[in-house]
Image: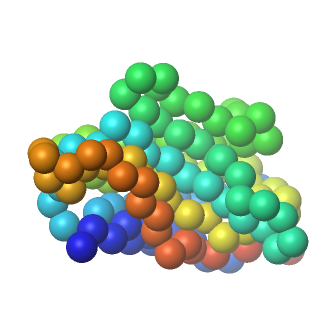
């Protein structure tokens, strides 16, 4: 069973940086998109950043210029470098991947369990 495992969350002061990382727990055949979403208390889950074969990289307007998504396709790893963090970035961050565990299977959407990011002074 494929699982996405996130790491790198934590507590940071405003203006600080964190780097999130997500990897698949087992080898998979391939993926065509990986990304990060977040959900703050009382709010809906929203896209933060996405990297895909067809559309390159996409970012939420609120994080453009501060966050950078990168992917290591050979290892099914996606990272999110977060700089100049603000209190409004506080949320649970979820990894997402659109992948095929085996060549004969269709692409399926997988989610990680989430990692907490808290930005506060």
What percent of the width, then of the height, locates residue 51?
46, 36
Residue ID at (46%, 68%): 112
Question: Which quadrant of the rendered structure holds the N terminus?
Answer: bottom left
The picture quadrant where one finds residue 32 is: top left
Q: How many marks?
A: 0
Does the rendering let one see residue 72?
no
Q: Quadrant of the C terminus?
A: bottom right
Residue 106 visible in the picture: yes
| Residue closer to the observer: 111 or 69 | 111
Figure check: 85 above or below 43: above
Closest to the observer, 17 or 52: 52
Of the pair 83 and 45, the residue shown nearer to us = 45
Instruction: Tell me the residue at 53%/40% (across/down).
Output: 50
Residue under the point 72% across and 65% down: 39
In this view, 95 is above or below 117: above
Q: Is residue 41 above or below residue 34?
A: below
Residue 6 % position (x, y):
44, 69
Q: Is residue 16 above or below residue 53?
A: below
């Amino acid at each position: 069973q494929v699982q996405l495992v996130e790491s790198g969350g934590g507590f940071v002061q405003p203006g600080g940086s964190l780097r999130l990382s997500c990897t698949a727990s087992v080898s998979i055949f391939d993926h065509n998109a990986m990304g990060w979403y977040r959900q703050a208390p009382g709010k809906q889950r929203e896209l933060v950043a996405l990297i895909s074969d067809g559309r390159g990289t996409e970012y939420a307007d609120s994080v453009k210029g501060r966050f950078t998504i990168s992917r290591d396709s050979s290892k099914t790893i996606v990272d999110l470098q977060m700089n100049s963090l603000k209190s409004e970035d506080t949320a649970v961050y979820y990894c997402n991947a659109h992948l095929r565990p085996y060549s004969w299977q269709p692409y399926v959407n997988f989610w990680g369990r989430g990692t907490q990011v808290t930005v506060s002074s």
